[in-house]
Image (cartoon, grey):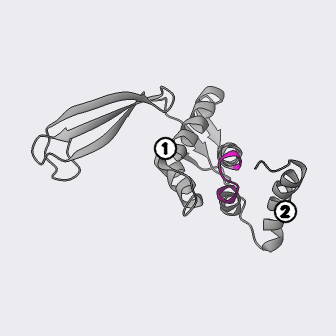
């Protein structure tokens, strides 16, 4: 593994443990040359999954692209990196279990929104605004109204 700091190609594994509900192994590594520590994740290589876009185009599934969109939605929200990784793991688990070789981008977006709605409602609305291509404030209100209704119906915990 090449060190991300000095680019030296020799390290030692300091710690290993299961991560993402057993779907990955988290390894803490230390560079032999500069002594810096960094984290890597090891996952089983999944079958090549294609995402079918709204226009019918197909592109390879990208965990990084998923992470980027979710991270942007969660920006400046009390959502940790670990929570985002767990959310991605949940979505991937469902997609790889339910889909063979292709997944519609709409299905992927809906799965992400289901998870975000439980995690952080502001991040959920942010993601929905981009994913559903909101054009005006009415679109926002249509998305927020069910959240507000649910909040009115369930008493607040103190």
Kindly identify which residue carries mark 1.
Answer: 82
Q: Residues within 10 Å of mark 1 (few under 14, many from 20)?
A: few
Quarter holding the N terminus is: top left
Count up the numbered dots: 2
Distance of mark 1 from mark 2, alpha carbons?
30 Å
x and y percentages locating residue 7 in the rendered image: 16, 50
x and y percentages locating residue 29 in the rendered image: 24, 38
Residue depicted at x 64% and y 30%: 99
**Element marked by disc 2:** helix
**Element marked by disc 1:** helix
Which quadrant would residue 18 be assigned to in this image? top left
Which quadrant would residue 131 be assigned to in this image? bottom right
Instruction: Say if residue 97 shows up in the picture.
Output: yes
Residue lying furthest bottom: 136
Residue lying furthest front: 158
In the image, 124: left or right of 77? right
Q: Residues within 10 Å of mark 2 (few under 14, many from 20)?
A: few
Residue depicted at x 67% and y 54%: 55
Predominant secondary structure, magenta span: helix
In the image, 91: left or right of 150? left
Which quadrant would residue 123 be assigned to in this image? bottom right
x and y percentages locating residue 38 in the rendered image: 27, 44
Image: 29 above or below 154:
above
Image: 76 above or below 51:
below
Instruction: Say if residue 62 shows up in the picture.
Output: no
Kindly identify which residue carries mark 2.
Answer: 142
Q: Nearer the viewer, residue 64 or 52?
A: 64
In the image, is residue 42 part of the stretch drawn in magenta? no
Q: Earlier in the sequence, mark 1 or mark 2?
A: 1
Q: Nearer the viewer, residue 17 or 136?
A: 17
Looking at the rendering, the stretch of residues picked out in magenta corresponds to 117-124
């Amino acid at each position: 593994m090449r060190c991300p700091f000095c680019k030296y190609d020799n390290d030692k594994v300091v710690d290993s443990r299961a991560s993402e509900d057993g779907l990955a192994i988290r390894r803490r590594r230390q560079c032999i040359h500069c002594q810096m520590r960094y984290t890597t994740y090891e996952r089983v290589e999944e079958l090549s999954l294609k995402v079918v876009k709204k226009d019918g185009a197909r592109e390879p599934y990208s965990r990084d692209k998923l992470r980027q969109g979710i991270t942007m939605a969660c920006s400046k929200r009390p959502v940790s990196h670990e929570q985002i990784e767990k959310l991605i793991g949940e979505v991937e688990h469902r997609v790889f279990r339910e889909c063979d070789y292709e997944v519609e981008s709409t299905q992927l977006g809906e799965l992400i929104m289901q998870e975000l709605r439980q995690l952080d409602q502001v991040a959920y609305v942010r993601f929905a605004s981009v994913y559903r291509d909101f054009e005006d404030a009415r679109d926002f209100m249509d998305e927020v109204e069910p959240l507000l209704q649910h909040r009115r119906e369930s008493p607040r915990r103190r």
